[in-house]
Amino acid sequence: MRWCWLLALWLPLTGQAELLQRTLCVFDPLGSNGGLYGMAKDYRAQALQWGVEFQLRAYTDEKIASDDFKAEQCDAVVLTGARARPFNTFTATVEAIGAVPSETVMQQLVQVMASPKAARYMTEGRYEVMGVLPAGPIYLFVRDRNIDSVEELSGKRIATIDYDEPSKRLVNHVGASVVPANSANFSGMFNNGNVDAAYAPALAYKPLELYKGLGNNGGIIRFNLAYLDFQLVAYHDRFPAEFGGKSRIAIAALFERVSRTIAADTAAINDEYWIDLSDEVSSEYQQMLRNVRLQLRQEGIYHHSMLALLRKLRCRETPSAIECVEKLE
């Protein structure tokens, strides 16, 4: 009987020893109180089934999270698509300006990236993207609602994420002035009047108090400049071979849950702030953004395969669009 007791004690200890201990660094503007960090807790529970036990670290400064990952203090990290650009050009192109016009296109894209056929694009060098989550369309917030066109933007100061080359190109393209900013300070610059405009998703409206910068005269242009996403990037040689594929499928399954959060954040914005564009103007802006995308593809900033995939998904949704005939992307 004694050996039975010893065996009973030994088996659980063996199971624990088989778990790989890894660190997951999570950028969430609200730190450990944020919704993204909450999802990371759920993800940690699921990863136990795949043989990995994560220790979570919350970061409110995205640059520090990225730097700690580069310094290999984190085995994996959650960052925005723009900040994840050094680790995977293919997935970073998800945030290509004007390339994801709707939630439907984004959902289809996330499903494609979670499929085994896309696995070869998920790894570049030592890095593997193990999941992509939507974070909603990016809108232009203006302190003066009379700034409602490209022409009106000329000469205006726009808080521009300084590590994101596409953003700087677009601001220069419309004749506005780049005011270097980052995810930690752009809201303060906007709210204090140091810039005329800033761009952000709806999820930033309340936590970053962007209504202070909008005041009584500001507005939000209801035009999708890009689609923000969060990406889980890891050193793929520190995880079991099948871990990345399982992770991408599990994270893609969270899409509906995240979409409900995005819808709630959007609904929380006061209706009076929204500025709607005519269909004709929207079409002109889409054409302008496509021209910028093509230029950035030529320079190797955007991945040509991702742009082609996005064009196909857009054309599945709107087959009558001119780009579906021209097929330039």
Image: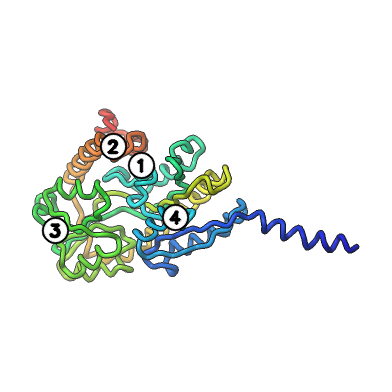
| SS assignment at label 1 | helix
Q: Which amino acid does label 2 sit on?
A: Gly
Q: Which amino acid does label 3 sit on?
A: Arg
| SS assignment at label 3 | strand
Q: Which amino acid does label 1 sit on?
A: Thr
Question: Foreground: 72 or 93?
Answer: 72
Q: Residue at x 78, y 63 (%)?
A: 9
Question: How many C-alpha atoms fall within 10 Å of the one at disc 4: few (<14), some, or many (≥20)?
Answer: many
Q: Residue at x 33, y 68 (%)?
A: 207
Q: Residue 300 carries which label?
A: 2
First-in-chain label (3 vs 2): 3
Instruction: Say whether residue 77 is left or right of residue 193.
Output: right
Residue 145 in picture, x, y percent from top left: 14, 61
Instruction: Say whether residue 274 is left or right of residue 304.
Output: left
The residue carrying mark 4 is 77
Question: How many C-alpha atoms fall within 10 Å of the one at disc 1: few (<14), some, or many (≥20)?
Answer: many
Residue at the outermost front position: 71
Q: Residue 89 carries which label?
A: 1
Q: Quadrant of residue 99?
A: top left
| SS assignment at label 2 | loop
Residue 185 in picture, x, y percent from top left: 26, 65
First-in-chain label (3 vs 1): 1
Distance from Cα at disc 3 to Cα at disc 2: 27 Å
The residue carrying mark 3 is 157
Nearest to viewer (mark 3 / mark 1)? 1
